[in-house]
Amino acid sequence: MPRPGESITRRRSVALASILLATFVGHVDSSIVLLALPAIREELGASYGQTQFVVAGYTAAYAAGLVTGGRLGDLHGRKRVFQLGVAAFTLLSAACALAPDATALLAARTLQGLAAALMLPQVLAIVQATFAGSERARAIGAYGATMGLAWIAGPLGGGALLAWDPGGLGWRALFLVNLPVGPLILLAARWTIVESRGPRQRLDLAGALLLAVALYALLLPPASAEGGQWSGWLVLPMAGGLLVLTAFLTLERRLQRRGLAPLLPPRLLAERRMARGLGALLAFYGGNMGFFTLVAYHVQNGLERSPLVSGLVFAPLAVGFALASAGSRVPHARFGHRLPVGGALLTAVGLAGVVGIVLRVPEDSQLLWLPLPLALIGLGQGLVASPLITVVLDGTPVADSGAASGVLLTATQVAHASSVTVIGGLFVAVLGAEPGAAGLDFDDYSRATGTACAAALALALLTAVLARRLRPASPATVDTGRTRDPGPAGPLHPAPAGDGAPSSPALRPSRPTAEEAT
């Protein structure tokens, strides 16, 4: 018969397994679909821009809702909001799989992003409430390993599932795999997660709505330019998006003056160090998702290889990232802000290699040459992702760490969404037509991929320049009584944000020594 202490430990272990499984599913869902975009275009008759928004719409909705989702957990209970998010995410996965056309798929993906914003911000809050001391450190380490596994499994698993094509379901199988997982998570969470709450704070629902409208208005036009050709009407929603963004910033300043809790506190955005850090994060993540998307198109449409081959092409990058992030603790402690600078430069070297290969190497030899620069990109990204967020947060007072973490992850998710539409828009503009159109040959794809990769290369170099300016904060200006840990991070998913409230542990759980790397 188990002792009471053993029963409690087993219950906590099952609780941890349930929230880690939710973390895996939520993060895999954004990367696994990358390789399916050509298949979605073909089956649903979707435009290139619509398929780009299958990724960007999910990410933009997550960005707009994640701070509010975290605060809802504080108000109504993290377990309750987590369960609601898991249930909604599972049902919307079914809606994605059953989508009869591109419009229905885009709507379901947007709502799925909102469901992720309810589910994922609760994970580290639950860890903080459930575990203490060394157990908490191990739980955060397991969380990091899950993030890394999700990143590796996304492209590889997606390519394998598309190649297997169970029941002739094609890309729809990528969403249907979530259906048996959701009930398991809900059942485990119901019986093992202990409810917890944080201090009550006013929800900035108006701010979340304005941010979402601004993001969609700014991101839709680049994705809607058919064949890369802009029409005059596309300028109108972008102008409207800028006006809505101005209204959002005005609202945030008004809430701050009234002593309330704005979605993105303007006083943090005005701090020089935070501004530089945000610039570096936007530049770094602004090239990632778009780069992954265009490589998928280059391999599948340009080189005419299968989705499985496309997924295997990403393996060196994923492995390189996992190795670098796992080994970044010691060099980060020694080199500080210089580590992300070096990582960004290594990423730039890898991107330069990809540009040279797609432009100069013959078609039948490119797959033999791509693994090396892609591995360098993965290594570089692993040296940037978590250390860069740590460097930015190290200059933030502890009282502001929850709000700062919310600002950082919102910015990175915005960068992801922008990357897909802007880098992807540049790719199709140089291509001169939508991928797969008649009359396109290998040289067209090489030129378009090389140009778009060069834009990602410029962003990597900009990351290095901005990260170099993030020198260690002065001890006189920072409360160092408590350290912050950004937790694990990934090339597609940085360390998870706090909910914007000081009570939330995200991006700032206690750490025993250094940041928990993926």
Image (cartoon, rainbow, N blue to C red):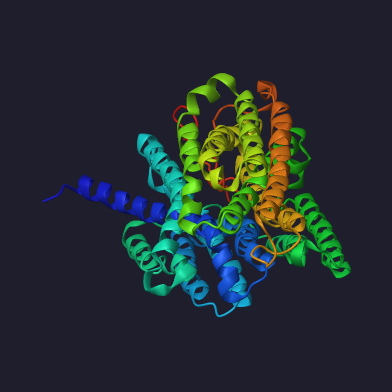
Q: Please state if 22 lies on the left or on the right of 54 as rendered.
A: left
Give the camera-side residue of 396 and 76: 396
Q: Please state if 7 lies on the left or on the right of 63 as rendered.
A: left
Q: Position of residue 134 (x, y in %)?
A: 36, 34
Q: Position of residue 88 (x, y in %)?
A: 49, 70
Residue 243 drawn above or below residue 12:
below
Q: Please state if 140 lies on the left or on the right of 348 as rendered.
A: left
Q: Residue furthest left?
A: 1
Q: Position of residue 82 (x, y in %)?
A: 46, 61
Residue found 52% across the figure and 52% down from its top: 198
Q: Position of residue 250 (x, y in %)?
A: 82, 55
Residue found 45% across the figure and 34% down from its top: 323
Give the camera-side residue of 26 and 446: 446
Q: Please state if 483 lies on the left or on the right of 410 as rendered.
A: left
Q: In terms of image quadrants, where is residue 61?
A: bottom right
Residue 111 shows in the view:
no
Residue 39 drawn above or below residue 74:
below
Give the camera-side residue of 18 and 29: 29
Residue 234 drawn above or below residue 325:
below
Residue 306 shows in the view:
yes
Residue found 76% across the figure and 60% down from its top: 432
Q: In terms of image quadrants, where is residue 408?
A: top right
Q: Residue furthest bottom?
A: 100
Q: Residue furthest top?
A: 334
Number of dots carrying numbers = 0
Residue found 16% across the figure and 47% down from its top: 3
